[in-house]
Image (spheres, rainbow, N blue to C red):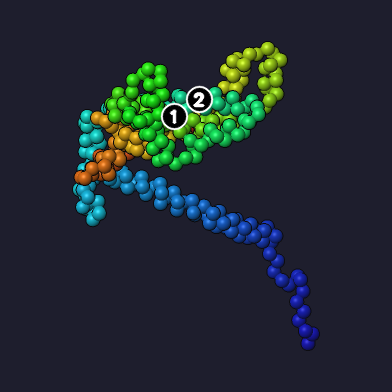
Amino acid sequence: MAPHVTTRASVPAVPETEAGFGRTSRARSSGQWTAWAFLAPVVVYLIAFYAYPLYRNLDLSLHRYTVRSFVQGGAPFSGLDNYRTVFDSPTFWPALTHTAVFTGVSLVFQFSIGMALAIFFHQHFRLSATLRALFLVPWLLPLIVSASTWSWMLNSDSGIVNTALGVFGIGPVNWLTSPDWSLASVTIANIWIGIPFNLVVLYSGLQSIPSEIYEAAALDGATHWSTFWRVTFPLLRPVSAITLLLGLIYTLKVFDIIWIMTRGGPADGSTTLATWSYRLGFGNLLPSFGPGAAVGNLLIILAMVFGLLYIRMQRRTLR
C-alpha cells in the first residue's frame, strides 16, 4: 500500500483577508493597551488631585460640618444653607468687590507693562538677554519671600518706600495698616510678581512674527505706533488671549501674597474671596468648613465661566 503523502492541496487554506484581519486586530488591541498604559498615570493624577478634591469641596459645601464630624463623618445634609450664609454675610460684597478690583487692576498693569517690556527686549540690543533674565527674578522667587520683602518695603515706620517719599516731603503712608491703602499695597506686590510671566509669554509670541512683515510695513511708511496697532497687536491676539486668561485664573485664587502682607485686613480692607475662604475654613478656632467650601466653589465657578468664554472666543476666531 502506498504511503499517504500530504500535499499542499490537502491542507485547508486560510483566506488571506481573514489572516490579515486577525493580525490587524491583534496589533490594534496591543496598541490600545499601550495607549491605556501611558494614559493611566494621567488619569490617576487627575482623579486624585482634581476630581476627588472637587467632589470633597462640593460635599463640604452641602453639609453642616464641625471639627468632630469632619474627622469622624456623619455631618447632616444642609443643602444650600451654606451658600445662603455666604450671600447673607456682610463680608460677601466687599470681598467680591476687592476680588474684582484686585484681579482687574493686576491684569491691566501686568499685561501693559509686560507688553512694553517684551517689545523693548525684542529689539535685540546689547545686554538684552542679561536684562531679560534679571526681570525673571520676581517670578522665580518663592511667594513667601516676595510677600515678606514687600511687607518690609511698605512698613509704615522703617519701610524704604516711606523713606523715599519723605525725601520729597511726603508724609508716611500706612500701606499695610490702613483700610484705605491695604488693597492697593497687595495689588502693587502682585503686579510686580506677575510682570515676568507676561513678559516671557508675549516675548515668545513676538519671536514667532516673521520679520518680513515689519520690513513691508516700514517700506509702506508705517510709524512705530501704527506698526504696533496694525501689525504686532493683531498678530499677538491669540497669545494675548491665553496670557490674560491664565493671569485671570491665577489672580482670582491669589492667597499667599495677601495673607502674608495683610491677612485680609485691616477691617477686611484687603479681603478677597480666596482669603475669606481660607479664614472661614482654617483661620478660626471654630472653623466653618461648609461656608468656606462654598466660597471656594464660587471661585471655581468664576474661573470656569471665564474659561468657557475663552473657548467660545477661540471657536469664533477659527471660523
Q: Give left or right: position of 18 versus 317.
A: right
**Which one is in front, 56 or 186?**
186
Few, some or many residues within 10 Å of mark 2 (<14, 14–19, 20+): some
**Which one is in front, 179 or 277?**
179
Q: Residue at x 67, y 17 (%)?
A: 217
Q: Are marks 1 and 2 in contact (CB under 8 Å)?
A: yes
C-alpha gap between disc 1 and disc 2: 9 Å
The N terminus - image quarter: bottom right
Q: Which residue is mark 1?
A: 191
Which quarter of the picture shows residue 17? bottom right
The C terminus - image quarter: top right
Q: Which amino acid, mark 1?
A: Ile
Earlier in the chain: of badge 1 and badge 2, it is 2
Furthest-bottom residue in this view: 1
Q: Secondary structure at mark 1?
A: helix
Which quarter of the picture shows residue 27? bottom right
Query: Can the viewer see residue 31 in this picture?
Result: yes
Few, some or many residues within 10 Å of mark 1 (<14, 14–19, 20+): many
Furthest-top residue in this view: 221
Q: Give left or right: position of 266 versus 235.
A: left
Q: Secondary structure at mark 2?
A: helix
Q: Which residue is mark 2?
A: 113
